[in-house]
Amino acid sequence: FVLYLLQLENYIVENMKSEMAQIQQNAVQNHTATMLEIGTSLLSQTAEQTRKLTDVETQVLNQTSRLEIQLLENSLSTYKLEKQLLQQTNEILKIHEKNSLLEHKILEMEGKHKEELDSLKEEKENLQNLVTRQTYIIQELEKQLNRATTNNSVLQKQQLELMDTVHNLVSLCTKEGAVLLKGGKREEEKPFRDCADVYQAGFNKSGIYTIYINNMPEPKKVFCNMDLNGGGWTVIQHREDGSLDFQRGWKEYKMGFGNPSGEYWLGNEFIFAITSQRQYTLRIELMDWEGNRAYSQYDRFHIGTEKQNYRLYLKGHTGTAGKQSSLILHGADFSTKDADNDNCMCKCALMLTGGWWFDACGPSNLNGMFYTAGQNHGKLNGIKWHYFKGPSYSLRSTTMMIRPLDF
C-alpha cells in the first residue's frame, strides 16, 4: 500500500509536472499570442503613423521645394535690384562728381563775371565822368564856335567870293583849253565827273581834287586814290584814327561830313549822283590792329534816291576779306539814329551806332564806334566786317572807293 501510495504520489507528481508544464506552456503561448497581437497592432499603428509621417514629409518636402524656388527667385530679384542699385549709385556718384565740377566752374565763372562786372561798372563810371567832362568841353567849344562863326562871317563871305572867282577861272581855263583829236579837230575839255576822269586827264598823284557831278549845283572836293590797283578811285568813306564822330543824323549822312584829307563821309546825295552817271565798281579796303590788310570788291554798285532811303544795290563779290559778302547783296535801306529803315525791331542804328545799310543789323557796319588797340575786342557796335574778323572785332582803318566799271 505504501508502495502504491508512493507510485500514486509519483504519478500525481509527474502528472502535476506534466500539467504544470502544459499550463506554463499554454500560458506562455497565450502571453506570446497576446504580445503578438499587441505587436501586430503596434506595427499596424506604426505603419499608419509612418505613412502619415511620409505624407507629411512629402508635403513638407514639396512646400520646402516651393519655398526654395521662391527663395531662389527672390535671391535673383534681390541680386538684380542690388546690381541696379549699384549702377544707380555709380551714376549718382558720377552725377555728384559732375555737379561738383559744374559748381566749381560756376563759382569760377561767377568770380570772373563779378570781376568783369566790377570792371565794366568802373569803366561805365569812367565813361560817364568822361561824357560829363566832354559835354562840358563841347558846350564850351560850341560857345567858342558861335563866337568864331560870328567873327568869321566876313571872312566866309570873302572866301565864297574867292571860290566863285576860282571856279570862274577854272571854267575859263576849261573852255580855252583844247585837246587835239586824231582827225585834227579840237574838242573842249569836259569837267571831271570823278577821280577816273582826273586820272585819265593825266593827274596820277593821290590827293584832293574838285569834281563836277551831274545834276549837282556845286562842285565837290573829294580824295582821289591814284595808287591802288590802277588808280582812279573816288573815296566815299574813310576811317583811320577816330578823330571824327560818325554818330550822325540823316541830314548829315545825306550831305556828308568830315575832311577828304582825313576821316569823312562823302554824303549819300553825292554818292547817288555819282553812281547815276555811269556803272561803278565798289572796293572796300580794310586793316585790323595786327596790320593785316584785306579787301572786298563788288562789280556793280549804286544807291537809290532819298525817297528810296538811299537803298544799296550790289552785284558780284570778290576779295580777300571773307568768302561771303559782309554787305547785303540783295539790298538794304540806309538807316541813321533818327531814321530807322532797317528790318529789325531793335533799331540797329541806335544799338550799333553810325549810319549804314543795316538790313536786320547785318554782318557789317563801317561807320560804327572807333575803338583803339586793346579795346577793340568784344565790341558789337564797333567798325565791323564780320567775314573778315568776326562779329565783335572793331577794325583799325577802312576806305570805301568807287571807280567806273569800264575804267
Image (cartoon, helix red, strand yellow):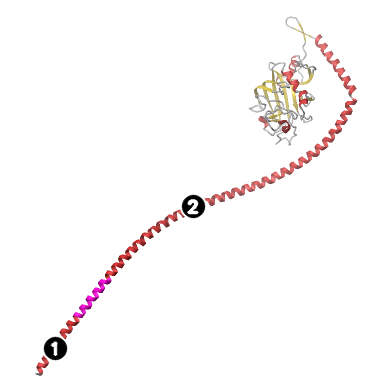
The quarter of the displayed image where residue 185 is located: top right
Q: In this picture, which residue range is highlighted in magenta?
A: 26-42
Would you say residue 36 sits in the magenta stretch?
yes
* Left or right relative to 201: residue 297: left
Can the viewer see residue 398?
A: yes
Whether residue 352 is situated above or below residue 226 in the rendered picture: below
Residue type marked 1: Ile
Question: Residue 229 location in percent, x, y?
Answer: 70, 21
Q: Are marks 2 and 1 in contact (CB under 8 Å)?
A: no
* Mark 2 lies on residue: 83
- Disc 2 marks a residue whose amino acid type is Lys
Q: Give the vertical position of 16 relative to 220 (above or below).
A: below
Query: Viewer-proximal residue, 23 or 195?
Result: 23
Around disc 2, counting alpha carbons within 10 Å, would you say few (fewer than 14), some (14 to 19), or many (20 or more)? few
The residue under the point 59% across, 48% down is 98
Q: Mark 1 Cα within 10 Å, few/some/many (few <14, many 20+)?
A: few
Q: Which residue lies furthest to the top in this view?
A: 184
* Whether residue 2 is situated above or below residue 70 in the rendered picture: below
Give the quadrant of residue 45: bottom left
Mark sitting earlier along the chain (2/1): 1
- Image location of residue 152, percent across then percent down: 89, 24
- 393 vs 10, left or right, is right
Residue 370 falls left or right of residue 331 = right
Tell me the number on the disc at residue 12. Answer: 1
**4 in the magenta segment:** no
Q: In this view, does 268 lie above or below 373?
A: above
